[in-house]
């Protein structure tokens, strides 16, 4: 039975990959979805509508407060408000892993701005609309890399650690507003972007070998956790990060 009926969700970075899977599954569970991405999100919107769901798409740069304000206004004008934010946008699949000694300041700042600062900005943007609805859910997408520190991805790992920190702080600050803030930390996921980047090929087999569940992880493995954190089932859960990686790390 759909668990998000009468809810309105906004998701960033949803044109493809994990974000697209998230958006489609939110709609499958009854949510009306604002699909945003810096790329054209129309394919995701079309998939939702083809399955009988409701969605609107718009191009959003998550580092732009003006764009984030447009996202919130779209939720209000199209669907009457906003109940759920999924902070999924980030840079990963296009990265070329390298030693931290070879990561210059411009690349470091870009990763931190897009992956971490955008979570700060987007959450600020949606809070007033959620308060108008009597509360809401924020789900941030972190990464299991924070727990084991893979070589070659220090800036990415730092950005995802920052998300865990903000999840804890934002959860405390918004508890009295009936807004729950939690995060998902996925393991290495075989999204279309990751599969297209040959630089990640060496990570695949060793990652599977260290999991308790010894197979590749796919976007669908995250969907149950997403719906739990977006639904009333998690109304007394906030500030938490749920690690979903097939048992690679125990936290």
Image: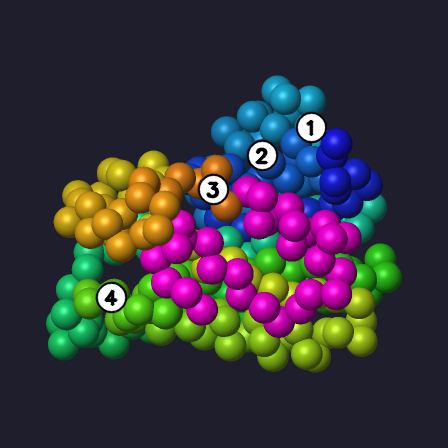
Residue 91, x across and y down, in percent: 36, 56
Q: Quadrant of residue 111?
A: bottom left
Taking depth in this image into account, of 139 and 39 the one nearest to the observer is 139
Q: Pointer 1: what residue?
A: 53
Residue plotted at (69% across, 36% down): 29
Query: How far separated are the C-alphas under marks 4 and 1?
Result: 39 Å
Q: Quadrant of residue 234?
A: bottom right
The numbered mark, 1 or 3, whose residue comes first in the sequence reads 1
The numbered mark, 3 or 2, whose residue comes first in the sequence reads 2
236 in the magenta segment? yes
Mark 1 secondary-structure assignment: loop
Query: How far separated are the C-alphas under marks 2 and 4?
Result: 31 Å
The numbered mark, 4 or 3, whose residue comes first in the sequence reads 4
Q: Quadrant of residue 77?
A: top right
Query: How far separated are the C-alphas under marks 3 and 2?
Result: 14 Å
Instruction: Read off the magenta span.
Output: 223-251
Query: How far separated are the C-alphas under marks 4 and 3?
Result: 22 Å
Residue plotted at (24% across, 66% down): 150
Q: Which mark is residue 221?
A: 3
Q: Which mark is residue 129?
A: none
Tell me if label 3 and label 2 are in contact, CB under 8 Å.
no
Whether residue 90 is visible here, answered yes or no, is: no
Q: Pointer 2: what residue?
A: 24
Q: Pointer 4: what residue?
A: 150
Mark 3 secondary-structure assignment: helix
35 in the magenta segment? no
- List the single residue furthest toward the front: 212
| Quadrant occupied by the N terminus | top right
Assess disc 3: are there few (<14), some (14-19) or many (≥20) residues with their C-alpha within 10 Å of its C-alpha: some
């Amino acid at each position: 039975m759909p668990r998000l009926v009468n809810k309105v969700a906004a998701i960033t970075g949803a044109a493809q990959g994990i974000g697209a899977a998230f958006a489609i599954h939110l709609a499958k569970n009854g949510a009306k979805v604002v699909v945003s991405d810096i790329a054209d999100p129309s394919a995701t919107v079309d998939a939702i509508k083809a399955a009988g769901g409701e969605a609107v798409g718009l191009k959003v740069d998550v580092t732009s407060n003006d764009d984030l304000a447009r996202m919130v206004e779209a939720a209000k004008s199209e669907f009457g408000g906003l109940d759920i934010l999924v902070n999924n946008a980030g840079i990963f699949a296009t990265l070329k892993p390298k030693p931290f000694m070879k990561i210059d300041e411009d690349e470091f700042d870009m990763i931190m701005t897009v992956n971490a600062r955008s979570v700060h900005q987007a959450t600020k943007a949606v809070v007033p609309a959620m308060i108008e609805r009597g509360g809401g859910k924020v789900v941030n997408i972190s990464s299991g890399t924070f727990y084991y520190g893979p070589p070659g991805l220090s800036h990415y790992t730092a950005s995802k650690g920052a998300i865990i920190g903000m999840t804890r702080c934002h959860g405390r600050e918004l508890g009295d507003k009936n807004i729950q803030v939690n995060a998902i930390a996925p393991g290495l996921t075989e999204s279309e972007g990751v599969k297209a980047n040959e630089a990640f090929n060496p990570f695949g087999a060793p990652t599977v070998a260290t999991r308790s569940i010894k197979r590749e992880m796919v976007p669908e493995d995250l969907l149950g956790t997403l719906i739990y954190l977006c639904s009333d089932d998690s109304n007394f859960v906030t500030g938490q990060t749920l690690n979903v990686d097939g048992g690679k790390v125990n936290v």
